[in-house]
Amino acid sequence: MARTFCKHIFLLGIALITVSDSYARDLTQVVSLQPIETIQKELRQLDEKSMVIHYGFQKEDVQFSILAKNQATKTKSYFLIFLWSHLDEVEVCIQKETCTKAGYSHPVSAWPVMQIFPTFPLELPPNGEKEIAIRIRSKNFIESEIKLITTEELFEIINWQTGLVFSFLILILAFLFRLIYFCLLYKKRWLYFLTAFHFAIFLVFIFGSGLANYYLFPNYAIPLSLFKKVIIGILILTGCAWLSDYFQTKIRYPISHRSFQAATVLAVFLIFCSFTDTPRVLISVLYTGLYLALTILSIRLALTNLKDQLRPTPWLILSLLCLLIFEVLNIFSYETFDSHDSKIYLFFLSIFIPANAFFVSRTIRAHIYDIETELTLTKLEILKFKRDLNLSLPMANSSDRKSYLNGVNIEEVIEKLTSLMTEDKVFLEEELRLSDLAALLGLTVHQTSEILNQILKISFADLLKKYRIEEAKRLLVEDVRKPVLDVALECGFTSKSVFNEAFRKHESLTPLEFRKKQLQLYS
């Protein structure tokens, strides 16, 4: 079902992009637009009614003049539009007299014409021309297509662009609601972070397309030069949290975990710099480099886990590759493709948004199988514990032994204990005491002790050894170059001798013998 939905969205996007070319072929050549100073390399003529500006990042205002000519025999009304631009302020002065302003540092309701991109009305006399002086101030990358079009052409452009954007919004919203449903159902931290990450993508899309400023906040000035930098920082923060928790880097990959932590600190710093006068080109370069580095690191971690029991890893790799390829194409599109034309940008989106949604959905779907399997095993363990408890309690003389578990929901306690051991891995804490575990469970020491000894039939020390040894077994095989002492300390043992003794008692092998045997099995 998800595959069919993504396919329909993709086909709709391609169809809308194809239909958009029709209006360009039907233009009547009675009006023209051209730069006055033809030697400016930042201005490039596309056709008689459109040109592209490419100034890049500029600290100072950008100023240039263009000439609009009307070859019709009567006065006609047109619109001068700046397609798919994220400019903070555009000032248009006609004949150096009437000046109007638009751009995202002004409320859309204060623009000369309320639209999703800066639009200015222009009336041309019969067989006449008008000089138009343009001043642009923006902390964003200054690049835009400028077109001179009629009212009919304006609405045609709006219809196909908003139609395509809304089709993507339907896909993103449906995907977000699905993620929220899974969060409520399975309560996994990485799902919460994944939902926050894709909500940030939703914000980038709805504000970057101009729809949020036009439909949701027309009376508020929301400069996209600032908003984009903040949201990109939030994307990096939520992405680091999601992937770090998903791969359990704190336990399994300490070096990668520190890389995620460093990236988080740098992202917070860049968000702070976005509110200052720090050059936007520097912030953009650092954001791009950080995004690419984190994506490549995540792909490497996913490749490392290909042989693990985590079934969705291949789908996650494809999802990360989508994010990586989209960013790379977005970088090169400024020079290689006509990125000023929104059709190119939307073409990228029409491919990568449905693809990413599909791959992430498959990732979650496969991981849910593991989650449900884990929950099933936990329920079976609880049933066994309850059965053993029912068998053992009648055998005890109530006058001889007082139970501390009256009013305690044993099932919930055991579920929480299992979560603490398998997900939070509290057993890795070297100085973990029974009182600490009791506090985490919300019980007294006596209640915790009774659950362990009478219901689970295991002492607190043996419980820690059991989980620590299982973790050590995994580390011994995954990183064959890691010294045994490092494995022991990382798993919560206080010394190599204590670790060797506990391991030999549990596995009838020393840690080195176990590692050698496992390597022989996999070789």
Image: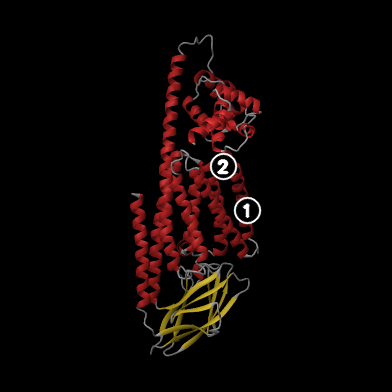
Instruction: Tell me the crowding category of disc 2: few under 14, some 14 to 19, or many 20 or more residues within 10 angstroms, Cα based.
Output: some
Most foreground residue, 53 or 501: 501
Image quadrant assignment for residue 350: bottom left
Give whichever of 295, 403 is nearer the camera. 295
**213 or 163: nearer the eye?**
163
Q: Is residue 444 visible?
A: no
Upstream in the sequence, badge 1 or badge 2? 2
Q: Where is residue 520 in the image (x, y as percent from the top left)?
A: 51, 33
Q: Residue, x 56% and y 64% (percent of image)?
A: 225
Identified at 59% across, 24% down, the residue is: 502
* Tag in front: 1 or 2: 2
Q: Is mark 2 on a helix, strand or loop?
A: helix
Q: Would you say 273 lies left or right of 453 here?
A: right
Callout 2 amino acid? Thr
Look at 38% across and 84% down and name the residue there.
29
Determine which of the numbered discs, if any, sits on residue 344 in the image.
Answer: none
Q: What residue type is labelled 1?
A: Leu
Image quadrant in which you'd find residue 426: top right
Q: Is residue 4 above or below residue 39?
A: above
Q: Is mark 1 on a helix, strand or loop?
A: helix
Asked if residue 21 is positioned above or below residue 496 in the image, the reply reads below
Mark 2 lies on residue:
249
Place of residue 375 in the rendered image (x, y in percent of width and height, measured from the top left): 43, 33
Direction from residue 151 to residue 413 in the image, left or right: right
Instruction: Describe the colour scheme in one phrase.
Output: secondary structure
Residue at mark 1: 266
The location of residue 391, given as percent across then percent down, is 44, 15
